[in-house]
Amino acid sequence: MAEVIIVGGFDLAREALAGVGARALRAVGAAWAGHAKGAEATFQKWGDALRESVRYEVDGDTVAVGSDMDIAAYAELGTGRHYAPPPEWMENRVRRGSKGDAAWWIYRGADGAFGVGTPQAATPFLRPALEAHRDEYREIVERCFRDDG
């Protein structure tokens, strides 16, 4: 019986799949960010600067979509009595960004000026874009692997 030895095949396959995976993540990130930017109610309330700040980033085998603007968290989750953390935060008993049940609060902006904050209802744009287009993102990943195969 003949002996078969495979040399380097697994490394080559791993490298090829890593390239396809990174391309798939970039494609999903771009699509997700595009869908998030289409949430008109959010940007009518919070402004086009927030829309323009929406970006995606690929790090290893993860894609993240978000914004570096502080108000992005407030838009997504609400503030004060309207604050609604994602369920996974509550599972871990973590409260982030909440102003409690305060009717108003004073804050200092990035420009140093003081302002008065009032509770704002959430106008999410990231999570709804992910949930509404989940099947499309799955198809993007499948297409990237199929086209490279």
Image: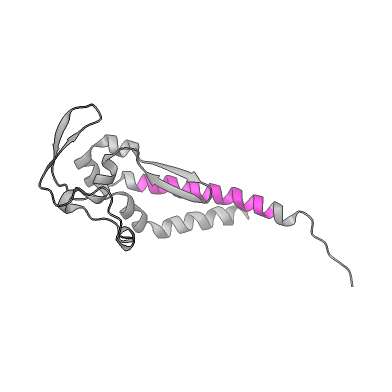
Magenta highlight on residue 46: no
Q: Which residues are magenta?
A: 13-35
Give left or right: position of 26 versus 105.
right
Where is residue 66 shown, x and y percent of the image?
A: 36, 44
Quarter-of-image position of residue 95: bottom left
The residue closer to the viewer here, 122 or 40, is 122
Q: Is residue 28 magenta?
A: yes
| Residue at image location 17% in from the left, 53% down from the top | 82
Residue 73 at x, y percent in the picture: 28, 45
Between residues 3 and 132, which one lies in front from this camera angle? 3
Residue 71 figure quarter:
top left
Instruction: Specify the quadrant that holds the N terminus.
Output: bottom right
- In the rendered structure, the answer to whether residue 110 lies left or right of residue 24 reads left
Q: Quadrant of the C terminus?
A: bottom right
| Residue at 79% over, 56% down | 7
Overall secondary structure of the magenta section: helix
Question: In the rendered view, would you say 120 is above or below 5?
Answer: above
**Above or below — where is 1 with respect to 62?**
below
* Left or right position of 29 against 103: right
Nearer to us in this view, 82 or 141: 82
Which residue is most to the left? 103
Where does residue 80 sit, x and y in percent of width and height?
17, 49
Q: How many marks?
A: 0
- For this orientation, the residue located farthest to the right is 1
User: How are the colours assigned in the image?
Assistant: one colour
Q: Tell me what residue is drawn at x 22 percent, y 46 percent.
A: 41
Counting from the top left corner in percent of width and height, residue 75 is at 24, 46
Q: Does any portion of residue 40 appear in the rendered image?
A: no
- Tell me the quarter of the picture where residue 56 sits: top left
Instruction: Using the rendered image of the protein, determine whether residue 100 is visible from the camera's viewpoint.
Output: yes
